[in-house]
């Protein structure tokens, strides 16, 4: 395997390693796609055999958006493995959360969430397993906040650190306005998310069985316009997207003939169809160059 430092057309240093000329030949085209988009982009790509990788602005911090739900999922399975809870334990559904800025109470608005049915279940219970499914597959903010308050944000950060994914910084629940006002935002780097997704892919995030079950949940993701859209039909993808205004992210384990982890973070594109198309294009070029 050869390795090199690649300097992009804007003088931005990226690192790459490859067995042959495929990836080296593809890098200028990928960088040109990014340049034309006008966006800030972070990419972390690595095959699971460790033989091929490419990083582009992989240590730049981006708003994590809903990719921060992956560390929450990992911590849920971690606490289940330790016997602190069971995935089928019921949890009361209440729309009442405490700001990590000052402890004050706030509520979520169903109109700002990607899933509304859970709001109709206030006063009922849902299992932790059901909430984790909603958190990942339809990106429910309500389910996420219920799990964060159950698990503890400090515990989530401790587990992220133990997995050497320190580029991920979970500071608060979703829609915590007071924390947001104090600059307490959840951030992620492409490298940090890549390390976390790779730990899941290798069965090291908690244990083999927990990782397998997390992958199954991530495979049921319903938003597939980014990384999966750049792949040939039929390839399994376990991933989590995230999007807010001018932020669009995707972090994926791709079960291609040569399996790989790919994380793409995009900042600065207002039209999410354009940012999704950019991520699909980057994915397509990396797939064609390395498979």
Image: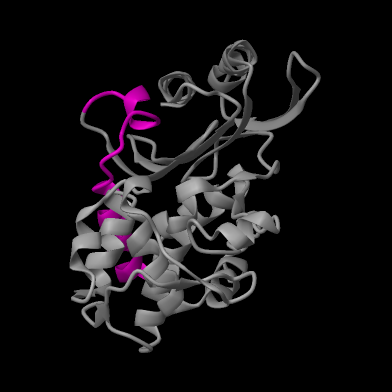
- Numbered range of the magenta stretch: 207-233
Q: Nearer the viewer, residue 231 or 127?
A: 127
Q: Position of residue 233 (x, y in %)?
A: 23, 25
Question: How many callouts does the rendering have?
Answer: 0
Q: Position of residue 267 (x, y in %)?
A: 60, 31
Q: Is residue 206 visible?
A: no
Q: From what the image shows, is residue 255 above or below residue 87?
A: above
Q: Nearer the viewer, residue 43 or 19?
A: 43
Location of the N terminus by quadrant is: top right
Left or right: residue 254 versus residue 268 is left
Q: Residue at x 35, y 89 (%)?
A: 83
Q: Is residue 71 visible?
A: yes
Left or right: residue 182 versus residue 197 is right
Q: Position of residue 88 (x, y in %)?
A: 21, 79
User: In the rendered image, which quarter is residue 80 located in?
Assistant: bottom left
Q: Position of residue 66 (x, y in %)?
A: 45, 49
Q: Nearer the viewer, residue 95 or 281?
A: 95
Left or right: residue 253 versus residue 116 is right
Say if the magenta span includes residue 136: no
Q: Residue at x 21, y 31 (%)?
A: 234
Q: From what the image shows, is residue 57 above or below residue 138?
A: above
């Amino acid at each position: 395997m050869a390795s090199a430092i690649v300097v992009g057309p804007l003088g931005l240093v990226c690192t790459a390693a490859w067995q042959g000329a495929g990836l080296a030949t593809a890098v200028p085209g990928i960088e040109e796609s990014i340049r034309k988009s006008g966006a800030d982009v972070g990419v972390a790509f690595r095959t699971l055999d460790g033989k091929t990788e490419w990083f582009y602005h992989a240590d730049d911090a981006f708003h994590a958006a809903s990719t921060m739900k992956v560390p929450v999922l990992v911590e849920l399975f971690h606490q289940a493995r330790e016997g602190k809870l069971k995935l089928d334990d019921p949890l009361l559904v209440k729309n009442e959360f405490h700001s990590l800025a000052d402890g004050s109470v706030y509520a979520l608005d169903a109109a700002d969430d990607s899933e509304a049915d859970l709001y109709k279940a206030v006063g009922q219970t849902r299992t932790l397993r059901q909430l984790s499914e909603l958190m990942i597959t339809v990106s429910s903010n309500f389910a996420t906040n219920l799990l964060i308050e159950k698990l503890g944000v400090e515990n989530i950060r401790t587990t992220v650190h133990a997995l050497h994914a320190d580029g991920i910084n979970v500071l608060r629940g979703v829609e915590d306005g007071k924390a947001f006002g104090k600059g307490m935002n959840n951030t992620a780097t492409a490298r940090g998310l890549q390390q976390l997704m790779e730990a899941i892919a290798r069965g090291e995030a908690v244990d083999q069985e927990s990782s397998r079950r997390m992958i199954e949940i991530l495979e049921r993701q319903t938003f597939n316009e980014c990384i999966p859209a750049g792949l040939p039909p039929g390839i399994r993808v376990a991933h989590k997207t995230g999007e807010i205004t001018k932020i669009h992210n995707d972090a994926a384990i791709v079960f291609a003939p040569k399996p790989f982890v790919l994380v793409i973070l995009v900042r600065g594109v207002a039209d999410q169809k354009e940012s999704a198309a950019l991520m699909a294009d980057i994915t397509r070029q990396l797939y064609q160059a390395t498979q």
